[in-house]
Amino acid sequence: MSGKNYELEVGLLGEFWGEWGRGECFESRNVTITPKKVTITSRKVTITLKKVTITSRKVTITQKSVAITISYHPTSTR
């Protein structure tokens, strides 16, 4: 199941960008993401993952080499 695209909120990206950049795990609401590579273009952020663990009730899904693509539109609001 590699190459799947997952939609993440831009705020989520900004909040955990420091941890992703250092290769640390991102954990939130039973979701664990371990990054392998982070690529940034002008309007797209591609994150290649070492491991994705999603725990929902009693279901655990582990995927390797999953690419998360986040499309965003930068705004001038700051």
Image (cartoon, rainbow, N blue to C red):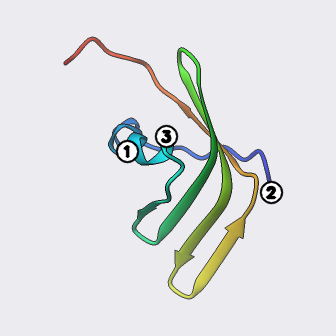
Name the foreground residue: 5 vs 24. 24
State the image coordinates of residue 46 (x, y, percent, origin top left): 62, 34
State the image coordinates of residue 14 (x, y, percent, origin top left): 36, 37
- Mark 2 vs mark 1, CA separation in Å: 23 Å
Left or right of 61? Residue 76 is left
- Mark 3 vs mark 1, CA separation in Å: 14 Å
Name the residue beneath numbered marker 3.
21
Name the residue beneath numbered marker 1.
12
Name the residue beneath numbered marker 2.
1
Q: Residues within 10 Å of mark 2 (few under 14, many from 20)?
A: few
- Mark 3 vs mark 2, CA separation in Å: 24 Å
Dot 3 or dot 2, earlier in sequence: 2
Dot 2 or dot 1, earlier in sequence: 2
Q: Is residue 31 above or below residue 10?
A: below
Q: Residues within 10 Å of mark 3 (few under 14, many from 20)?
A: few
Tell me the amino acid under the disc marked 3: Gly
